[in-house]
Structures are given as C-alpha cells and as structure tokens.
Image (tube, helix red, strand yellow):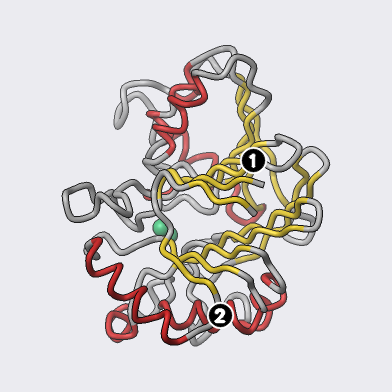
C-alpha cells in the first residue's frame, strides 16, 4: 500500500520558511491499498491539495474519509476540498460511534453559510455517512480496518489498515502515558503489534511535557517505547508542534536515533511511503 502525507502539522497550520521542509499543513493522509482502494484520514488543511490532485483523475470511485475527531486541525480543510462541490464525486465520511453525532454537526456548523460562505447541505457531491463500531471497524473493498479509542480530551480514534500481509497503523492525537487513560497502554501495544509502519503523534519532547501533560499528545520517547514494545518495523513521528522549526525537528529526531534500533523518521508533507 502507498501512504501519502498531505499534512503533518499539529494544532494549527504553521507555514513559513522555517517549517517548509516538514510542512505546515494540518493532518491529512491518503492511503491507497495494493488493490487500488483509497482511504483518506482526516480533513486538516492538507486535504486542499489532495482535492486538487483528485480533480485530475478521470473516474474516481467513492472516496471514504475517516475522521479521527473533530478538533479544528482535523476538519478545517474540508471547505477547500473541491471534490465536495462537484456532482461527479461521491464521498463517504466515516466516524466512530461515540464521536459520530458531533462529527456530523461540526462538519455542518463549519459550513453553515455564516462562518464559511458555502453551505455543506447545498454542495453538489453525493455525501454519505457511516458509523463505525469500536469492535467491528470497517471494510475498504476487500481490506479490513480496525479502530482504537485514543487518549485525547474528546473521543478520538486510531486506525489500522490490513493489506495482504502488511499493516499500517495511524494514531494521531493520542496521549500514551496519561494518568487515567480511556485506553490502557497495553491495548495500544496489542493494536500496533508487528505493524510494518506506525505513524504516531509525537508533538512534544520530555521537556515540553512538563507543562503539557493531559493535553492529549505524546512525546518522542513514549512513542518509541510503544513501537519497541509492539515490535513495529518502522516509526514515523506526526502532528509536529507548530512552534518546532525544521532545524529543531531534525535535531530532536537525530537525538532520538541514539535511543532505538527501530527505523524512525519525521513525517513530511508530500512524502510517499510504501508498505
Ligand atoms: Zn490535532
Ligand atoms: Zn485533537
């Protein structure tokens, strides 16, 4: 399967000369399985460019978009995702049962004709919605995807995509080592067990975490521990702090390489990964 990052920044877009290497757009990932089935995860500002690419394709089958949660940085790009305005596109939003009511209302509220000039209920594309049960996950053509409840201030979900013998786990906005977790650490280890690629939120350093514990994000070292405990083959850090420059991010990741034998890297906007 092929994974393309369209947005890797956390919390708020952070464009500028000192973030241009890793990228300033917020979360949006495109997965295309070996059978050609596409899944989009999240509608952060990165989805704008993905939409422009989709306009160049002739026949696009229904586009499933799994929304991990409705914090701004994960939905704010939707009004600029041009396929929603075109009748030739069919879009399916998927959200976990616990977050579904707010997902639906928040997508409409951010396009109500007042805070944004176009109304979601008047767009031309064919939009459907699918509730995903925690213990059932969902299917992507012949592929299966599992979900897991993250530790975050609002209901938020991680996704695991099985494609043949390969697995890709994407967990953003997840605090692994929180005091009273929604989901115990061991369950994340089981969920990610043996994954070929794990992309996980690593917004903070240990130093940052002295003031950000409880905000719903993890540190680089915590995520490395998860990857090691789960026997993950490759680990990408995601949801980069908007204040962290390219130079600082390179430095932190460089230092982290001394802490593990696992292949680690920082997710970069525009980068395509093969699993
Ligand atoms: Zn976020
Ligand atoms: Zn969040």
Q: Is residue 242 visible?
A: yes
Q: CA distance from mark 2 to mark 1?
A: 32 Å
Whichever of labels 2 and 1 marks the residue nearer the N terminus, that label is: 1
Q: Position of residue 13 (x, y in %)?
A: 28, 49
Q: Position of residue 14 (x, y in %)?
A: 24, 51
Left/right placement of residue 143 relative to residue 89 reads right
Q: Nearer the viewer, residue 74 or 155?
A: 74
**Residue highlighted by disc 2:** 181
Q: Residue at x 73, y 52 (%)?
A: 145
Q: Is residue 160 above or below residue 115?
A: below
Q: Nearer the viewer, residue 28 or 174?
A: 28
Left/right placement of residue 81 relative to residue 142 reads left
Q: Quadrant of residue 192?
A: bottom right
Q: Is residue 233 above or below residue 13?
A: below
Q: Residue at x 67, y 47 (%)?
A: 1
Q: Position of residue 92 (x, y in %)?
A: 64, 33
Q: Which mark is residue 32?
A: 1
Mark 1 neighbour class, 10 Å CA radius: few under 14, some 14 to 19, many 20 or more: some
């Amino acid at each position: 399967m092929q994974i393309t990052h369209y947005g890797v920044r956390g919390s708020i877009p952070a464009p500028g000369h000192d973030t241009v290497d890793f990228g300033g757009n917020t979360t949006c990932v495109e997965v295309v399985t070996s059978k050609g089935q596409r899944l989009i995860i999240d509608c952060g500002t990165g989805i704008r460019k993905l939409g422009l690419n989709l306009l160049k394709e002739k026949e696009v089958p229904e586009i499933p978009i799994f929304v991990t949660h409705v914090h701004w940085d994960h939905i704010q790009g939707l009004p600029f995702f041009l396929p929603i305005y075109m009748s030739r596109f069919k879009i399916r939003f998927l959200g976990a049962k616990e977050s579904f009511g707010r997902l639906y209302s928040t997508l409409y509220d951010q396009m109500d004709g007042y805070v944004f000039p176009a109304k979601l209920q008047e767009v031309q594309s064919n939009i459907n919605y699918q509730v995903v049960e925690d213990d059932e996950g969902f299917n992507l053509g012949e592929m299966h995807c599992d979900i897991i409840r993250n530790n975050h201030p609002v209901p938020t979900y991680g996704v695991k995509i099985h494609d043949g013998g390969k697995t890709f786990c994407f967990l953003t906005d997840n605090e692994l080592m929180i005091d009273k977790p929604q989901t115990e650490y061991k369950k994340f280890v089981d969920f990610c067990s043996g994954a070929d690629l794990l992309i996980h939120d690593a917004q903070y350093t240990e130093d940052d975490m002295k003031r950000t514990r409880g905000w719903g994000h993890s540190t680089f070292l915590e995520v490395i521990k998860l990857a090691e405990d789960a026997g993950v083959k490759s680990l990408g850090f995601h949801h980069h702090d908007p204040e962290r420059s390219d130079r600082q991010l390179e430095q932190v990741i460089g230092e982290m390489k001394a802490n593990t034998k696992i292949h680690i890297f920082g997710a970069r906007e525009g980068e395509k990964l093969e699993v």
